[in-house]
Amino acid sequence: MPEPVESVIQPEEAIQPEETDAAAAGPEAKGRYFLRFTLGQRYLHAVLFTTFLVLAATGLTMRFSGSVWAIRTARLVDGFGTILFFHKFCALVLTLAFLIHVREIVARGIFKREKGIFWGPTSMVANWKDVKDLFGHMRWFLGLGPKPEFERYAYWEKFDYWAVFWGMVVIGFSGYAMWFAPFFARFLPGWALNAALVIHSEEGLLAILFIFSIHFVNTHLRPDSFPMDMVIFTGRESEEEFKSRRPEEYQRMQSEGKSATRITDAPPHWLINFSRVVGFTAILIGLTLLILTLSAYIAG
């Protein structure tokens, strides 16, 4: 599930610098650093990618239960019943995180009437600039024009976010329809429950293929981030990264005099090392699951 779903709707005005121990920072402490993601956003992303990895691993094992690797995995954990238990448990945790996120959007965007939630340069809602950036990026790939200058969220980050949002609704509803079939059978026809099984399986598989290929490549394997984009783990980025990746946002904050509100300390050395271990582990698991999925399709 996307940067990005590492991206949570959050205007700059709501972001406050974190207090960190500058003395504990490593050699990366040179130069200014800017806060991109708050601690709450990073926690939410951690819950998202952790539960998604478990859901993907357990879901694929049940989806391809006849494969050799699926049978061996089930034997290691005392059967498919255990796998189903962890699948349901992580589904509940992920649903709770999703509802917390939706509640925050509604509270800030509707009740508090915060600017930038549903429209503008800090919103995750797509606008005309994203369309122009998409075609401008394609022209740049082909050497036909300059590279577009991005704002706080690039068009592919917004696509990742809404792909996760859509997947949460479709995959989540179909999964709960199967889990609590007697309840849903009171007002849904039988064919709808059969359709829920197909939708849950195919949409889940599509989400896995998207996250472990498109999202991983866009976020971590593009040239300016390779081999890993650390910002979703540390929450911070250097001024050079800020200026090169999102020059429009940088220029806008400078002109509005808001850049000082985002200045923070460099990430401590322990956090950088911890982030690398967690990030590379997640990527390795994701790529392994992607290979197993493709091999199961080929073998089938």
Image (cartoon, rainbow, N blue to C red):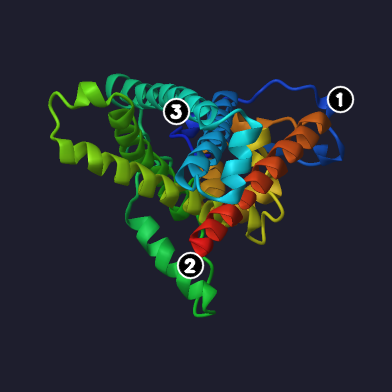
Q: Earlier in the sequence, mark 3 or mark 1?
A: 1
Q: Is residue 185 left or right of residue 109?
A: left
Place of residue 180 in the rendered image (x, y in percent of width and height, measured from the top left): 29, 23
Residue 225, relative to residue 136: is it above or below? above
At horizontal 50% and vertical 33% (from top left) the residue drawn is 12
Q: Nearer the viewer, residue 92 or 5?
A: 92
Whether residue 154 appears in this view of the structure is: no
Q: Badge 1: few (under 14), some or many (20 or more) residues near its Cα, within 10 Å?
A: few
- Amino acid under label 2? His
- Residue at the disc numbered 3: 91
Q: Nearer the viewer, residue 85 or 248?
A: 85
Q: Nearer the viewer, mark 3 or mark 1?
A: 3
Query: Label 3 vs label 1: CA separation?
Result: 40 Å
Place of residue 265 in the rendered image (x, y in percent of width and height, measured from the top left): 74, 30
Q: Nearer the viewer, residue 176 or 138?
A: 176
> Residue 197, located in which quarter of the rendered image?
top left
Q: Earlier in the sequence, mark 2 or mark 3?
A: 3
Q: Which mark is residue 23?
A: 1
At horizontal 35% and vertical 44% (from top left) the residue drawn is 125
Q: Which mark is residue 137?
A: 2
